[in-house]
Amino acid sequence: MKLLNVDLGERSYVIHIGAGLLQEAGRLFAEKGIPHRSPLMIVTDRHVAKHHLAPLRQSLEAAGYRVCEAVVEPGEKTKSLDMLNSLVATALENGLDRHSTIVALGGGVVGDLAGFLAASYMRGIPFVQVPTTILAHDSSVGGKVAVNHALAKNIIGAFHQPLMVLYDTSTLSTLPEREVRAGLAELLKEGLIWNREFVHWFDEHAEALLALDADALREALYQGCKVKAHVVSQDEREGGLRAILNLGHTIGHALEAVAGYNELLHGEAIAIGMVGAAKLSIRLGYPEAETVYRETKRLLQKLGLSVSIPAHYDTEAIMSAMMHDKKFKEGKMVFVVSPEIGRVEIRSDIQPDWVREIIEQLKRED
Amino acid sequence: MKLLNVDLGERSYVIHIGAGLLQEAGRLFAEKGIPHRSPLMIVTDRHVAKHHLAPLRQSLEAAGYRVCEAVVEPGEKTKSLDMLNSLVATALENGLDRHSTIVALGGGVVGDLAGFLAASYMRGIPFVQVPTTILAHDSSVGGKVAVNHALAKNIIGAFHQPLMVLYDTSTLSTLPEREVRAGLAELLKEGLIWNREFVHWFDEHAEALLALDADALREALYQGCKVKAHVVSQDEREGGLRAILNLGHTIGHALEAVAGYNELLHGEAIAIGMVGAAKLSIRLGYPEAETVYRETKRLLQKLGLSVSIPAHYDTEAIMSAMMHDKKFKEGKMVFVVSPEIGRVEIRSDIQPDWVREIIEQLKRED
């Protein structure tokens, strides 16, 4: 098991990464001082519940906890105020009080939803994240929790740090292959923004990661979480530095919005977005940007990911989605660009026309 | 104008109290550094809008702000996730971004709702409170914001401190007389828990307050806010001390729950609850408790408030509502009691039977 401390002053917490942590949950909860007198509530989705709910529940109950559960439908649509309303009813019916802890068992959707439940129930109670996807390494560091509105994604939320994170790499074996690839793309992103050595390591271990080798996963999740934890600890409320984590997200979010939430996985959209950001960096004249572009593309393709925008996506619809994104300041386009591998910059002087051109090019990328 | 600083470190803010502040809002916003580039959104209710929306809006617009508005129905029912959903739509449609400020113009309902909108929109944007009721002196200090759930009041919320509070005493002249009396009861509560001299002052100025004399109101709101600010600044997240603010609230909340939200005003319920707390203090054997009881009752009656529980309220329903209240620890009843005027204690050893008896007595109180 590897431990990573996310340093946020009195809101600091530890990420535990290793195989078999679900079975250790009860002991770890007790060691963390989570009280036994108030019930816990596990929030998970139907797919994850099938494989991982029973062992987690058993471990917690064996340690003397009273546990209730809420099993939601998988998918972005679950992240709604309606679902929050329903989870609050479940919490009240099961007597959750201020000393209760919410346990988010699942990927980013469950983490966001259960995290916002914890942030807002009785004005905030603790929660523990138990991520079951690779992508969730991202949402499990930083405390950003939210639900969607019909008009915008993640628009209603909070910053609410977990009490701890239990990252059981064994749970990743039940992930569909497509989600593995997409999750690895987002892990690679952490290297691309901050850690050149991790990118080299990633290159060498891509096959092991795709094969879900436990040691490789533990190391990769540790390194990925470490980058994010480092950035977040310097900028908890997203004032500045934290924006570098959005490499690939400006185009990526727009693609997700145009695709509808189910056609493209988040990591797949971000993968294309990172290639776009590299192309933009070339355009901006950074001498190393060609290398960034070539390597980003090669590594993503090594993971089996597409780096081109599906040709039927409407360019103007993508542009328009970007204009509605939160990541714009005073009408100008803000972009995270990649001057070299392991380092990014935030540019706020990006001409929409350059981006339009790159989107067109990405449709022909291969 | 009187200024009161609420000392919460980097979340500190100033409460401005005085006549005519609506007309000063634009200037005060600009002085506070609220940016002009992003739109403001005023949230208010239909009753308040009639009298006070236009002057506030004009003042803000005259200072160069773009302003949009959302006018909701008055009453507790408005504090819902559905309404939050609708306000988020309004915010998005009007282009509110992270630099926008929400302006809560109204009483506690508007403050709670608009405050939770501000706490959760884009994971938190600033808000300014412009209270238009006496009771709102309470909700305008402390940052507690929330909406209701069908099963529980104020159960979904956050701690979110305003950027500043503009308390225009002129707006109080449009309050129905019943709300004036109820609001004054809650102001008196601040004295009863913390400031014996303010209780004496209150006694001497009760007529002036009922007549909405501007000087008397300014002083009373200042003193009331000061008590609350002092307590909150020592216990922002309601860990301990802050509970003393709940004098009268254990019984009061239960009465509200049994009455339905419209039959008893909050201040009316708290008034009865404070008399109940004084009776409980006598039962606990505090030597000065008889005086507390007599004075509390006399002052509330001077304000024209009833101090008895309507006879048709079911005692067991009241008891049961108390058992569901958040203010219970491990099954025991927690009560704020009044050993002497200007000082309270929190007791967690209260027998339900004592409370039952007092509720029966309060039905015969006159």
Image: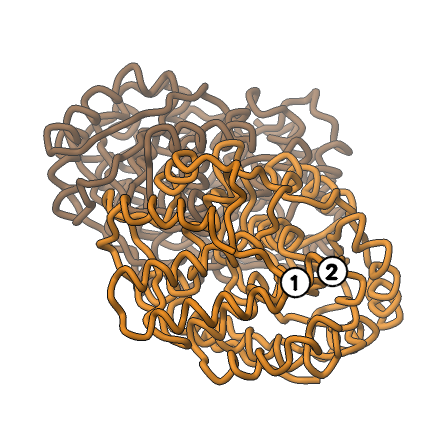
Chain colours: A brown, B orange
Write down the chain letter for disc 2: B
Disc 1 residue crowd, few under 14, some 14–19, many 20+, Cα 10 Å: many
Labels 2, 1: one chain: yes
Is residue B5 in view? yes
Observer able to see residue A198: no
Mark 2 closeness class: few <14, some 14–19, many ≥20 residues within 10 Å: few
- Above or below residue B207? Residue B249 is above
The amino acid type found where label 2 is placed reads Glu
| Quarter where residue B21 is shown | bottom right
Quarter of the image containing the N terminus of chain B?
bottom right
Q: Can you name the residue that lies furthest to the top here?
A: A50
Image mark count: 2
Vertical placement of B194 versus B57: above or below?
below
For label 2, the residue is B177
- What is the x, y in percent for residue A310? 63, 23
In-image side of B341 versus A294 (left or right): left
Q: Is residue A213 left or right of residue A263?
A: left
Which residue is painted at 66% across and 41% down in the image?
B78
Image spot of residue B262 (x, y percent):
64, 42
Q: Which residue: 75% across, 32% down?
A: A317
Q: Position of residue B112 (x, y in %)?
A: 59, 52
Residue at image x 45%, y 41%?
Answer: A116
Marks 2/1 in contact by CB < 8 Å: the verdict is yes
Amino acid, disc 1: Arg
Q: Check disc 1 and report its element: helix, strand or loop.
A: helix
- Chain containing mark 1: B
Residue B286 or B22: which is nearer the viewer?
B286
Q: At which x and y percent is residue A216? A: 22, 35
Image side of residue B180 versus residue B271, left or right: right
Find the distance from the CA under tag 2 to the CA under tag 1. Answer: 6 Å
Q: Which mark is residue B181?
A: 1
Which mark, residue A303?
Answer: none
